[in-house]
Image (cartoon, rainbow, N blue to C red):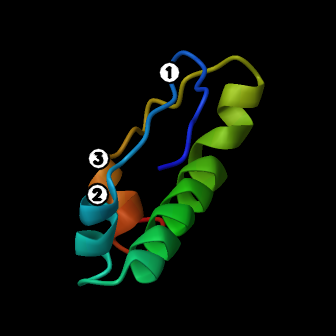
């Protein structure tokens, strides 16, 4: 158990789900989630930094699947 203090809008994902993303490996699942965050920030970050919302929104799975699609 790890005590956590989260800000509004943050979330925690259970270890089982993370492991399922990594085909049974929590480490591999965490790497996939980290890469998804990188991919989303690459695609959306510039517009959001300027207070704009990208009209080319994709499903989260598109970013998880291995890059910008």
Between 5 and 58, the residue placed more toward the observer is: 5
Query: Residue 25 appears in which quarter of the rendering?
Result: bottom left
Q: Secondary structure at mark 2?
A: helix
Q: CA distance from mark 2 to mark 3?
A: 5 Å
- Residue ID at (29%, 46%): 59
Label drawn at residue 59: 3
Q: Secondary structure at mark 1?
A: loop
Q: Which residue in the rendered view is the most extreme toward the right?
A: 50
* Residue 52 picture location, percent across and down: 63, 20
Local packing at callout 3 (Cα closer than 10 Å; few below 14, some 14-19, many 20+) is few
Tell me how far mark 1 sits from mark 3, CA to CA: 18 Å
Q: Is residue 46 left or right of residue 20?
A: right
Q: Quadrant of residue 50?
A: top right
Q: Residue at x 70, y 17 (%)?
A: 51
Reading the image, the residue beneath label 2 is 61
Distance (Cα) linking label 2 and label 1: 19 Å
Query: Is the residue under label 3 in contact with that under label 2 (CB below 8 Å)?
Result: yes
Task: Please tell me how crowded label 1 is: few (under 14), some (14-19), or many (20+) other residues with Cα within 10 Å.
Answer: few
Position of the C terminus, as image quadrant, is: bottom left
Q: Which residue is mark 1?
A: 9
Instruction: Tell whether label 1 touches label 2 (CB within 8 Å).
Output: no
In the rendering, at what x and y percent does residue 17 appear?
25, 60
Q: Mark 3: which secondary structure?
A: loop
Q: Nearer the viewer, mark 1 or mark 3?
A: 1
Q: Is residue 46 above or below residue 1?
A: above
Sequence-earlier tag: 2 or 1? 1
């Amino acid at each position: 158990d790890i005590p956590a203090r989260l800000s509004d809008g943050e979330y925690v994902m259970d270890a089982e789900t993370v492991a399922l993303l990594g085909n049974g490996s929590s480490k591999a699942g965490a790497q996939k989630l980290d890469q998804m965050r990188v991919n989303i920030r690459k695609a959306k970050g510039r517009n959001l930094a300027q207070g704009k919302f990208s009209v080319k929104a994709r499903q989260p799975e598109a970013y998880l699947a291995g890059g910008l699609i």
